[in-house]
Image (cartoon, rainbow, N blue to C red):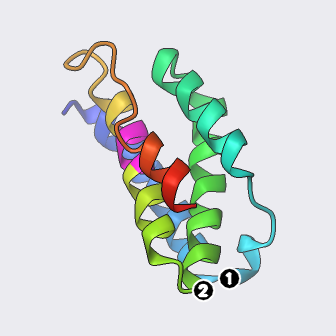
Amino acid sequence: MTFFSIKKFISFTPLFFVLLSNPIFAEQSLTKSEILRKSNECFKDFQYKVCNNLLLKMEKMQLVESEQNRYKCQTSILGLQTELIETYYFKKLKKNKKGIMIPYVNKNC
């Protein structure tokens, strides 16, 4: 990883800690179909602002799922978030990345 990549990764970290520590942020969430559609768009063409916003909304959604003891859905969303982050940071290494976790989000949520 380059210094620039590490710097962007570190910029994501405080946002996740804020969301994890404050369940009030988990009020608004995306529907499953919106997550799947926007995730596919991010796999095709990662636009930083759009996909970053999607990651934050997915974080809210997985927190809600955790509070409702729906751990399969939560885990599937976490996996999809991981794939999106990998797509952004390792886009030179993995071309034509497809969402392996998309069917699991579809099934478990």
Counting residues from the N terminus, which is met first, the one under dot 2 or under dot 1? Answer: 1
- Point 43% across, 38% down: residue: 84
Q: Which residue is mark 2?
A: 67
- Whole-angstrom CA distance, mark 2 to mark 1, is 9 Å
Query: Residue 92 at what x, y percent from top left?
Result: 25, 15
Label for residue 23?
A: 1
What kind of element bears circle 2?
helix
Query: Residue 63 at what x, y percent from top left?
Result: 58, 74
Query: Which residue range is magenta in the image?
Result: 80-85
Tally of marks: 2
What kind of element bears circle 1?
helix
Which residue is at the far front? Answer: 107
Which residue is at the far right? Answer: 28
Q: Residues within 10 Å of mark 1 (few under 14, many from 20)?
A: few
Which of the 4 quarters of the picture holds residue 29?
A: bottom right
- Camera-nearest residue between 105 and 60: 105
Q: Is residue 109 above or below residue 104?
A: below
